[in-house]
Amino acid sequence: MPTKRYGYSITKWNQAKDEMRNLLIKYAKSGIGLPTYSAIAANLTTIKFEPEDYGLAAMLGELSEAEDDSGRGMISSLVVSKQGGRPGQGFFELAACRGKKVNPEDDTSKDIFWIAEVNKVQQTWKNKSKSKA
């Protein structure tokens, strides 16, 4: 069993993943906009990533898989690039590998899927907030 992920101990990696998940949930609940990769990287304190680091993308992918497996949608749909204003290509490729109805090579297909996924994630967490109130 591996003891490190992208140079970090599994313990530290999992702590950072929990921190990232909590940060993304705050964005989902608030509905105040979508964070950029830069904003997510800047707000993590457990592990420091640059926006283009493979480790950041890997962690977002792991979170999306876990959240999607739990029926809450691909939470990394919330994270967008400054340039394009939508998730990176890896998000769409992961979605396609998971059997989602998206063509990673077609911008229209990507936009339709992405918007639906953002809505699903936001609704899931907004409903969880209401049920706890």
Image: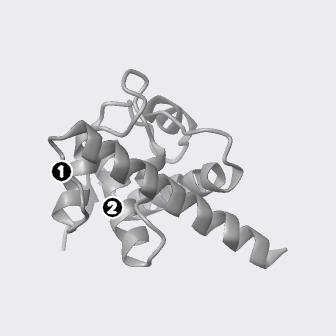
Q: Nearer the viewer, mark 2 or mark 1?
A: 1
Q: Position of residue 16 (x, y in %)?
A: 47, 54
Q: Is residue 65 above or below residue 102?
A: below
Say which amino acid is labelled 2: Glu
Instruction: Locate residue 43: give its quadrant.
Output: top right
Residue of label 2: 62
Identify the residue shown where x is 55% and y is 52%.
24
Viewer-proximal residue among 70 and 56: 70
Tell me the quarter of the image containing the N terminus: bottom left
Q: Is residue 106 above or below residue 126?
A: above
Residue 42 visible at all:
yes
Residue projecting furthest to the top: 83
Say which amino acid is labelled 1: Asn
Identify the residue shown where x is 76% and y is 78%.
131
Number of residues whose C-alpha sits closer than 10 Å to that of mark 2, classed few (under 14), some (14–19) or many (20 or more): some
Q: CA distance from mark 2 to mark 1?
A: 21 Å
Viewer-proximal residue among 39 and 16: 39
Number of residues whose C-alpha sits closer than 10 Å to that of mark 1, classed few (under 14), some (14–19) or many (20 or more): some
